[in-house]
Amino acid sequence: MAALTEAEIEKLFSGAPQFFARSQGHGTGAPHPSVAFPWNEELGIRDLADHVQIGDEAWGSVTAGPRLIHRDPMALASPSGKKRPHFNARCQERPSMLSMQGLEKGTIGYQAALEISIADALQEEQYGFDSLGSKGHIIVEQRQKLITSKDGLRHLDDATIMEQLMKCEERYQSERRGVRMKSRELYDELFTKTLHPPTRVIDPNDPYSLAVQIQALVKVLAAPNTWTDFSRVEWRIRLGQILWGFPLDDEIFDGTEINEGDDAHDRNEERYWLLLQILLACELLIRLDTITEGDEFGLGQSLRASEVHRFEKEANVSVRWSLVLARSWLENITVKKSHVTFSEPSTPKGWLSSLTSKMNLKHEHMHGSYHVDHSHHRHNAQSEHTFEIQGKYSERQANGLVHFARKLRWPDIQFSGPKMCEKAMSLGNATPITTPPVTHDTRRNSYFGERPSLTRRKQPTRRRKIEAALHPSGWFSKSYASGLILPGEVLSQYIMSALLEIDDDVLSRLGPMASLSGGFVYSGKSFWSTTSIVGRVLAAGQGAAECMGWISSDVIPRGIEEGWVNVASDPMPADLARTGRKARIWGKTTIERESDVLGDADPSNVLPADFIIPYENAYPNSPPSNIRVELKSLNLTSQVDSVSTTPTAEKGFSLFSDSGKENDRGIHTYPASVTFTISHDALDRDESHNFGLSNEIYFVTAHPCVASSYVKYFKSPTSPTIQQIDVGGHDFNGKSSSPAHITGHPLHRFYTYTAIHLTDLINQPAATLEDLLSKSPVNNRSSNHSTSSVPSRPPRFLVIDCVTGFAPPPSPDMPSLSRMSSLSSSFGMEPTNIPPIRMPGSIDMERRPSTAASTHSRVERIDPPSQSPSPSARMRLGTHRRQFGSDLEILVRALCADRGWNAVISRRRRGCLSCAIREAGALGWKVVIRVE
């Protein structure tokens, strides 16, 4: 038997995804997971993805990485200007939010599955930043040192900061129009208004260069214990709270020790330092953009290699996230100045109590040891300038909110959409609101009562659990409407809160306190955060919808009519043990070795017999037929030994309404389970099964693949291994053959697996995953497939067959989805009568019969088309979006949640089983769910 040549191997695995994790350079953190098709040049294959694309301009802030926005054809075009070369801060939210919504509803992609074990949420809290108000002694001392030094930051009052922000905005917009400022002008502006000039000459050849200015700004922004570090997820969500959270009834609890501050004066302190941080970051970003554009077009200045090295060394993660914030500010926020005359002497006022909110110039920048009152700077005690900040694209954000509601199938959205859009638009045009002089704490009674002590430190969590107080047109809504949103799960929390806050009726029915990581029942539907295991399981059902981290379902918990609920669930100990530096993502070599298309073979000696064609349904005895699964109920049962309310009992909080009376509508935490009935031809009566949803496990969409139509396999009817591979389209004397575009890619015998039918798995409730793999029967055809020549190697993967023998769900006939398509199962929620789009040069592909029904039957040879079809033609991308989902798929996910198994979900018409098994190997997972 001749060994396969390198060219034959490339043809054999053409269209097969290969899995990597590669470092991106110094200071970029953990390796970057990626999926590539190194042996394909066709864009139709290289662009395949396992996640949905961003569907609206208003949602683009969800990620710091590159993204394509698949715009709704009916949506308004973005009002943003022409894109120009700009500086890439090279910092990325972890996990990538692009990969957090897989093609299968309720799943994530390969990248997110690896990155979730090094998630930003796992970081320790920022030292000294335990309040939205005044900070600890060390922070105050460092800030005082920074603004009193003669070799760094000048002391700036509020008016100067806002004036400089207006100039930065003007300069940024001018650069986008191609107007370039001279380096000397930027130097004079920076070192006369914001920073002290350098005390020594940094660059004798060009003392006014952009490099000198960049170095000075980085030095200030990188000062320790001074600035808010937005790499911490708790500060990304509190960005809007600092700016728009007035009066002080804006509580949020995410398990951190951060409090809301003592009063408005206390909160003003942090707002001042935030605006100063934004100003410095904007100044730095504009100069970095100028350098980048000069490099792109060969104009202006450029940095020397030594200067680039110094920047990479000194610009820490906090500086880079400040640059991300600056970009968002310059893109989305405008500052306006106006003159106000008072009939009485002015007094300190609250600021930014609405989206367009007034800032008072009198401000205390330091408490205790350093105090500055700017009232003496006014030329006239009876007049002052005020500044407004306002989102530039309130219409874009309002349309994005309605789009979100439509995707989630919000109740009566077809009637309430215009009114919702109008209310969302009004958030950007609200009349400025000021507060009286702050002589006492003007907060309402706390929804959370006394904060619990966190000395019994919470266990690490890969996704933060958020609880917050919502109010009509509150700071969540205003933060969303402004567009000033940092990457991560913040957008998910903002957009759902905005949807609830703009409707007074919803808030009155659900209550003022929200669990943004749990779920709620409203108007006959349930809505769940994808943080909740219940949401990830119910997403597999027919009629479920997913958008921006939220799931909607027609399944509602039994006994719950309306209101918020939390579900008691815990991460798997094995998953928690593999977080941080112990996460699998750091094992770059292991990831590639355990997913290699050639397994552990020597690349110079690869034989056809080393490969098999894996099937999920090869059994010595046929499974039952006409199997039907029906979901009977979602159960939330109260624990007998605890009151089980969140946060009142478990966290020591007390709930109060505005009137101070105890609120009996607290958010309760329940153990959850789902109940099903199963029937098939071998049963006399229906069986009932219940599965608990107590384990926080994840599901990954198997990456789509494209198998070549010109590769054919030849094998004996009695042998699982491939005897011969034809990569040239030649005839081998009429031997039994099967085209690759039917069978998918071959699997190297290194990847041992065993298949089990779902009904057999259900009937073994006590069996662990290790039991199922170690007790694989010798006559199991699937096990024999991959162990025939290596009998001592036990199966490493469990394939759950959810295809064979199951009756189709009662649904309208839908067009088939090509194996090669990465079309999302949740991208298009609305039915459409538009005929499928024909790609240029496409041909109609008939639906071929599956050859996986039995390995005992000879496979009839089917020749590929006489003319070479393009990859686009083989993918049959239509505008009909098949609505996958069934009670069967809910059941298999619930079973995995009950037993604590992370699983890869492989849909037969989207990807082959071989590639799904290799992806499980890359992730270090052991379970593959095979669905129709």
Image (cartoon, grey):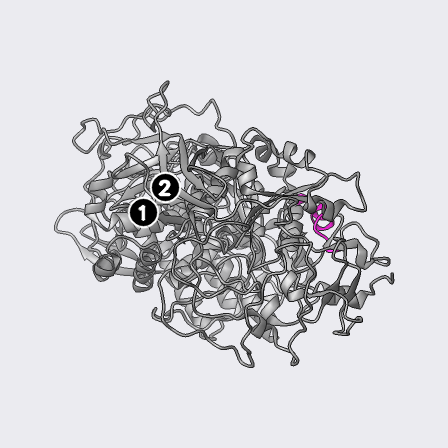
Residue at the image position 81 percent from the left and 46 percent from the top = 789
* Amino acid under disc 2: Leu
CB within 8 Å, label 1 to label 2: yes
The amino acid at mark 1 is Ser
Q: CA distance from mark 1 to mark 2?
A: 8 Å
Residue 516 has which mark? 2
Q: In the figure, is residue 71 to the left or right of 438? A: right
Looking at the image, the residue that sits furthest to the left is 343
Query: How far from the left and from the top, in percent, is residue 816?
Result: 49, 64
Residue drawn at (74%, 57%) of the image: 717
Q: Position of residue 358 (x, y in %)?
A: 25, 52
Residue located beneath label 1 in the image: 497
Chain part drawn in magenta: 586-598
Q: Which mark is residue 405?
A: none
Q: Is residue 104 visible?
A: yes
Dividing the picture into quarters, in which one does residue 193 lie?
bottom left
| Residue 255 in which image quadrant | top left
Task: Please state which of residues 467 and 297 is positioned toward the viewer in this rendering.
Answer: 467
